[in-house]
Amino acid sequence: MSLLSVKNLSVILATNDGPARAVRNLNFRLNRGETLGIVGESGCGKSMAALALMGLLPERSETEGEITLDGENLLEKSDAEMCRIRGNRLAMIFQEPMTSLNPVHTVGNQIMEPLQLHRNMSDSDARAETLRLLDRVGIPNPKARIDNYPHQLSGGQRQRVMIAIALSCQPDILIADEPTTALDVTIQDQILELIQTLVREEGMSLILISHDLGVISENTDNILVMYGGAAVEMGSTAQIFDELIHPYTQGLFAAMPKLGRARARRLVTIPGTVPDLISLPAGCTFTDRCPLATDICRNTVPPNVEVKAKHFVACHHLDEARHRKTEELFS
Amino acid sequence: MTTESHPVPVLEVHDLVRHYRLPRESLLAEPGHVFALNGVTFEIYKGKSFGIVGESGCGKSTLARNVMALEPTDSGSVKILGKEVVGLSFDQLRPLRRHFQMVFQDPYGSLDPHHNVGRIVAEPLAALGPISKAERESRVRNVLQSVGLKPHDVSKYPHEFSGGQRQRIAIARALITHPELIIADEPVSALDVSVQAQVLNLLKDLQDEFGVTYMFISHDLAVVEYLCDEVAVMYLGEIVEKGRTEDLFNTPAHPYTRILLDAVPKPGSGQKRERIKLKGNVTGQTERRVGCSFQDRCPMAQDICREVKPPLSPVAADHLAACHFSDTVMKTG
């Protein structure tokens, strides 16, 4: 049985302009020790899906569907029960380490908090464990750093502290939402390496959320591509990069400048901009920007077709999408 | 290009130095300094794109502000179209500013939310002196069209546009004075991938159409490779390697460049490539050190690196690097 299974998850946010479906009918499974990458642009619902898993959605929101962790539906849990699950079984690393750490507490106190709350540790035990965690996440000289405030650390070190907090209660699943977007490439490399090592050694599952196909490609077993709140393509990382099928995945890959590519060739662009969640079509969310779109796309939700073993694509025009080259598709 | 016989640099930067003074920590101690720029020299020729890459804290944005004459420079020279701009007063600079304009990183912070697009885009025309209303309107219309916006967008306000469209407005504002040089500081970092490609293609098209020269600052090496003819890699306020984009990316001669290139995740390359990794992060902006600026993080540092500062010297045609071991670095490519 999968450790985590998400069935028909929808998140509806109440906004002043009406309800916005930030996540629509999302389905995926995550086994123990597996890594899943969720990739998409801003507003595609990847962060909302993560917040729904953590039970941290904004107040004016509704969820539908099921999130099952070890056979228990998280959406039916009370706040008090979620408090015990959060941190203990599910932990999250956020994008901006400066805003997600509290500036008026030392990093030591912030790591000790979950240890004392969830694992009932005494002050001295928690402090000893904190030193061990700081060392584990590669912060040099933990004895001096434990009493530092976040502003005294560099961006990379702050993200290491966030990882130490997430690790403190040995969660089953680590959710990392754009953990390296605010960091330089060399630091990004270090942090991703650290997350990989920890996930492997502690036997955790990882959900890595990113807009960067490169980051996802190098750090995950499976990928879920989201657009406008819906999953458009899903499968094993190797399989998907072997054959990108959905027009959006193709366009996203082609629009990315890649090192070592001939400079004379123009980048492929997807026309239009990232959609507004309130006015999305009822059918395929990519309709307005898709070169293959027809009437059926606008009104009917495309079926999730298994094109190869465990490689799912949600598109009405599968054959055309598969057989036309990306450059022709978006020209 | 017609300039090939007599190349005229649009921008010449020579030995530019900028140090920021830190607040005194005690009455008796000398105040510390942040050594943001320590003698940067380069030139950009007409119609070319010059990329500047480096991690945060390497001085690339300080360089942009100094070239734009937005803050006083300690020493060195910046010549735009052969005319020195360092040391000029605000009033003397004003008529010159039409030749060099800037596009900033954050399209949300760089446009005044109280002004409509027409007013935002027309603002740099003030540097040209009085012009007629009809002339101003026609120029705004033309420039909006060339960046792919519609004429009726002039009466809209910034909040009515998406991030990519706002960056188009910022580019239109920079273009309206027909500048020779546009300095773009991370112009696409805040944009989504699909929108970033549109703006990058727009920048290329504008260069083909108007022959503008770009000084393009970015931390994203793939973006720089796509857009730039020449690249300089900065580390701790110095250029450590400079050359034609293809040379520098194919055969890097400085270990820092090689590590930066290796650190970029590549989609579809499979998991975990073999690569040199870099420990620690950029430190040492506040100290004067002997020897190479990269010595603390360099995997191949030797005694000589701690004693003698390697000069930026030629390693191939049009390719400079500041490393004692650039031959070894180039061979291991």
Image (tube, coloured by chain):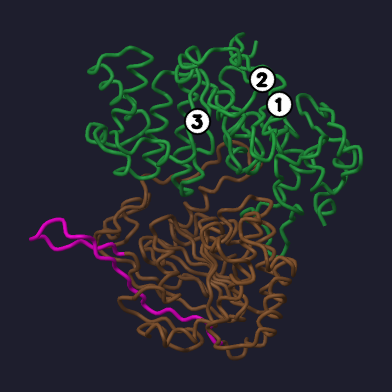
Chain colours: A green, B brown
Q: CA distance from mark 1 to mark 2?
A: 7 Å
Q: CA distance from mark 2 to mark 3?
A: 23 Å
Let me know if marks 1 and 2 both belong to one chain.
yes
Reading the image, the residue beneath label 2 is A6
Furthest toward the front, the residue is A16
The location of residue B16, given as percent across then percent down, is 36, 75
- For the point 75% across and 53% down, the residue is A272
Tell me the number on the disc at residue A137.
none
Is B14 in the magenta? Answer: yes
Q: Residues within 10 Å of mark 3 (few under 14, many from 20)?
A: some
Is there a contact, CB below 8 Å, between mark 1 and mark 2?
A: yes
Q: Which chain is indicated by disc 1?
A: A
Can residue B216 be seen here? The reply is no
Reading the image, the residue beneath label 3 is A196
Q: Amino acid at mark 3?
A: Gln
- The region drawn magenta spans B8-35
